[in-house]
Amino acid sequence: MELFKSINAHLSNLVLRLASVCLAALGLVVIYGVVMRYAFNDAPPYVEQVALLLVISVAMFGAAAGVHDAGHIGLDSAVKLLPAKGQFLCNVVVQLFVITFAVVLLYGCEHMATSTRHDTIPTLGISEAFRYLPPIIAGVLIVLFSVQHLLALFTKKATA
């Protein structure tokens, strides 16, 4: 369990750093596009598509890191009023829902990537499938991180 937690912590740290780099790059790309459009009247056609890829990356990688850190929105006021067994059950159900969401995300993105792999993003000259790479990576990480949370719930329950 400790090795799994350590690997997940490193993956979360890596993906959070990657999201930070993508966010910084997004800022630079947008500034570049605005300056080129309004100062030089020469808008580069690829800026919008690069920005879109970066937004997807920031959102997906940030979401995965948020799941690891349990930093997602938690509306647990009512759950805290429940007895320990009720809280445990609610936490398990939440993690199962998160895993289900991640599996559906993986399935949908894999399907879309497969069906669009022969199409290209015209202004970038790369496959449309690249749009689905960040959600696929995030989906895998979300499953791993949620499994870690589930294991922690059950090992705490077993040792309590």
Image (tube, grey):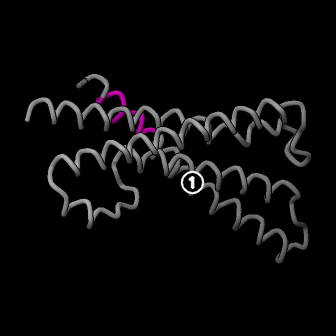
Q: Which of 116 and 101 is in front in this view?
A: 101
Nearest to the observer: residue 89 or residue 68: 89
> In the displayed structure, does residue 71 sit left or right of residue 159?
right
Quadrant of the snapshot with the N terminus: top left
Please name the residue shown 69% across and 38% down the image.
Answer: 109
Task: Provide the secondary structure element on which disc 1 rests.
Answer: helix
Q: Give the image location of residue 22, x and y in percent.
A: 59, 51
Query: Which quarter of the figure has residue 79?
Result: bottom left
- Main secondary structure found in the magenta portion: helix
Q: Residue furthest left?
A: 160
Seen at 52% across and 32% down, the residue is 140
Image quadrant in which you'd find residue 107: top right
- Depth check: give the residue in front, 18 or 138: 138
Quadrant location, the C terminus: top left
* Residue stretch in magenta: 5-14
Q: Is residue 89 above or below residue 82?
A: above
Image side of residue 128 versus residue 147, left or right: right
Task: Report which residue position mark 1 lands on.
Answer: 59
Residue 145 position, x and y percent, is 39, 37
Give the image quarter of residue 89.
top left
What is the count of numbered marks?
1
| Residue 44 forms part of the magenta stretch | no
In the picture, measured across the screen, residue 29 lies left or right of residue 136, that is: right
Query: x, y percentage for residue 56?
Result: 65, 51
Disc 1 marks a residue whose amino acid type is: Ala
Residue 48 in the image: above or below residue 91: below
**Residue found at x 50% / y 52%:** 20
Which residue is at the front of the view, 53 or 132? 132
Residue for point 40% across, 56% down? 72
Tell me if mark 1 has few (under 14), some (14-19) or many (20+) residues whose alpha carbon lies within 10 angstroms of its own: some
